[in-house]
Amino acid sequence: MASNGIHEEPAESEDAHNMLEADDADEELEAEDEDAHMDSDPGADDEDEQEEIQLQNDSIAHFDGHKDSIFCIARHPKQTRIVATGGGDDTGYVFDASSGVSVPPQESQRASIRPLAKLEGHNESVNALTFTLPDGAYLVSADLQGQMRAYRDQSPDHSGKSWQFLASTQEVEEINFLTPCPHPLYPNTIALGAKDGSVWVYTIDGNDTSNSLQIVQAFYLHTAPCTAGAWTPDGKLLCTVSEDGSFYAWDVFGDAAAAGLASPQGGQNYVVGLTADDERFRVEGGLYSVKVSPGGAFAAMGGAEGNLRVVGLPRLGSVAATNAASTASSKSGAGARAKPGGGKQASGPKAATADVSTGQAGQILASLQTQSDSVETIAFSQPPLTFMAVGSVDGSIVLFDARHQFAVRRHITDAHDGEAVIQVDFVNGTGDENWMLTSCGNDGTVRRWDTRGGAGGVVPNANTQGALREWQGHRGGGEGGGVLGFVQDGDRIVTAGDDRVSLIFGP
């Protein structure tokens, strides 16, 4: 990872001229009391106690292959215990999170999980990873130098345990995120956002040896770094935000156009576009996170100083597309190199004629500001619950109720001991699991919350209402510590540590 620090030559202090000569130093040492080194240190007990606290580790297994901070983590969509990590050592790894020895580290000298694959070839920090949908046939990594690399699952049983490099490309100078597309007609498709503000959509086709990474679309309307992106649940629209305060919902595959929903500006291939020129939408300092609701009716985006905007999206229903999905799942995604300037739909499966409901599309449904610092992360609960959880750099988590005009249901002001909240995510389950929210922060902990009850009010810290459990093991406090992300599969959580270690928590 490149260093941005400014190194100055230390100035020679006045004391340097008064340093002891070698002979004088010997005399000084001889004058020391010979028994001095036997004296007990009054602070030793405190140091031992502090060391014990630092050694607390609730993990059942770990992976320590990285030599620098782990910046990103991804989970296989089918083989959910297969995990990929990328870090500041310009390297990625794939490992099986279920293969570790299930004992706390305090009880024995526990060995690290052995990697299934080492992802090499990057020349800068690996800051984004994703497995493709629907089956995890490919793993894609990206770095701070703009290189994207794709790997193919070579396992005979498609278990995700053997990976082979397929192809690489570099169209931009820095990639900020990768996100996989869930569209049933376009499998193995991903989107990326770049530092120059551009947005790119690729399809990976390992059967085309001459063009395995195929550009489907490229968009250039953001005028500052594109910081985050999210697909609608049906994969028909891609929502992106930027440091310039703009938001776009891109009609990547032409589904909206086929339904007769025209772009506000002809030829630009977006169905909703809002910028800082609109006073109602403007967020000074830019937007840094975005998430689409489970039903696809609206997108929520977070920015500087705790600002949130909620914007309506068009609903693109399609009976024809649903029927076609069953025959498309085995196809490799199609795509053609788009013209510079982006806006040309790729060749491949044609968008089916769809029923479209514009409803409140493009309308600002809510403008919220409950937290005091940048909104880092947003998550939605699955139906029938309608919660939106928001984590902020100010260390708080806010639960909004989308069903009741985004009223604040709970405000946990000190969710991670005064440190930034990096990620929140609801447990993706049914019944009794829907209400559980997991979070991680720069304090080095992972916490799980009960989001039921407690309407209104402020929860001062994790030791009061709502906290179900806490897992420790990473260093915290921002000193080369903290948890920079996690993936979860029910009760098992796998982390990306700023301290170079991935910990596995669970039964």
Image: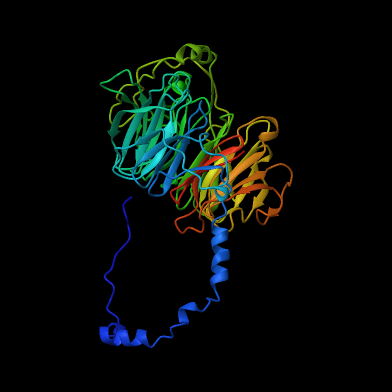
Q: How far from the left and from the top, in percent, is residue 351?
A: 44, 17
- Is 281 or 455 nearer to us in this picture? 455
Name the quarter where the C terminus is drawn: top right
Q: Is residue 48 left or right of residue 170?
A: right
Report whether residue 380 is seen. Answer: no
Q: How far from the left and from the top, in percent, is residue 254?
A: 42, 22
Q: How far from the left and from the top, in percent, is residue 460?
A: 67, 57
Determine which quarter of the picture holds residue 384.
top right
Residue 73, compared with residue 203, is above or below; it is below
Q: How far from the left and from the top, in percent, is residue 140?
A: 38, 32
- Is 198 or 172 nearer to us in this picture? 172
Residue at horizontal 27 percent and vertical 20 percent from the top: 209
Residue at horizontal 50 percent and vertical 55 percent from the top: 475
- Is 116 or 171 nearer to us in this picture? 116
- Colour theme: rainbow
Determine which quarter of the picture holds residue 357.
top right
Residue at horizontal 53 percent and vertical 76 percent from the top: 40
